[in-house]
Amino acid sequence: MTSSISRAPKKRRVRRQGVIVRQIENWSDFLTIIQRWDGFRNWCFRGQGSASWSLQSSLSRHTRVSQICPKAWELQETRIRRIFERKSHLFLDDPPQDELEWLALMQHHGAPTRLLDFTWSPYVAAFFALERATDDAAIWALNLPLLWSIHARLSVHGIKVFDASPRDARLLEKYYLPNKHAFVWHGDPFRMPQRVVAQAGTFLVSSNLGMNVEDILAQYPGDGELLIKFILPAAKVRAEAMASLYAMNITQATLFPGLDGLARSMAYEFEYSWQVDLQTNKMLGVHKDPYLPSSLLDTPKRN
């Protein structure tokens, strides 16, 4: 007897891969990808000025620059965290309430930490990727729904990541500072700094300063794509993209509230003009003929 209940189609399973690389040919190509796939709303993004850079926290990079022995990393990370907390009260009216908030505050003011900045906005990520890029830049996209699912169902390197929140000082000391595990935790401090809010920011916290995030994720159990790396050739994409982002009000002034951000935004203000084409110094056509083109005025015909 055949059941009248139709079976749901099997979900496509993709064997775990390292990084899916997508070459972007022009700005419209990237916009089309983002705007036509609702699933990206739950991903997070990170823009980097060079496609050759790995996903590393500022403290991971600093361990290589400083050439500190890996066996001393735990001691020294604890040291800078303690020094910052002991002295920052001179400048704080309302100190952080948990470990992640302390790390976010340190990162905000330029201290090296194991946090890796991401954003919920692919456009903010594009700004950071292209603002100063001269060669191929990159926008990394992380599949958070799949990451959350793995953390909820499976152990990663012997750890239940949902039970290893770095907000708790004891768990930070147990699972992160020793650099013996290989997982990333995603989340935010409960009280979010102004800059994080302005950038629609969120964080990854790596459990291992000696490993790139993409290498950690490549070892995750299960299947499916966790990381996409969009490569954007700055020479072909930057001018149009930066003008588009400027029209969205994505600038240094809005992403870094305060006088410093305003001052940084002057660099792009120098290369933007509503009056002239800065490549030729000729008046823009819209000033010669300020009326709307017929293509915008014509009423579309209905079938």
Image (spheres, rainbow, N blue to C red):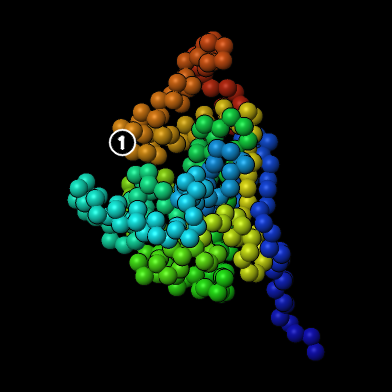
Residue 125 shows in this picture: yes
10 Å crowding of disc 1: few (<14), some (14-19), many (20+): few
Indicate the quadrant containing the C terminus: top left, top right, bottom left or bottom right. top right
* Residue 106 percent location from the top left of the image: 35, 50
Residue with the mark numbered 1: 258
Is 166 in front, or is 223? 166
Residue drawn at x 47%, y 31% as measured from the top left: 246
Residue drawn at x 68%, y 36% as measured from the top left: 25
Residue drawn at x 53%, y 22% as measured from the top left: 292
Residue 38 shows in this picture: no
* Residue 120 percent location from the top left of the image: 48, 51
Is 139 in front, or is 296? 139
* Residue 27 percent location from the top left of the image: 61, 35
49 to the left or right of 189: right
Question: Where on the picture, by quarter, is residue 26?
Answer: top right
Residue drawn at x 80%, y 89% as measured from the top left: 1
Is 154 in front, or is 301? 154
137 to the left or right of 268: right
Is 302 in front, or is 143? 143
Q: Residue furthest bottom?
A: 1
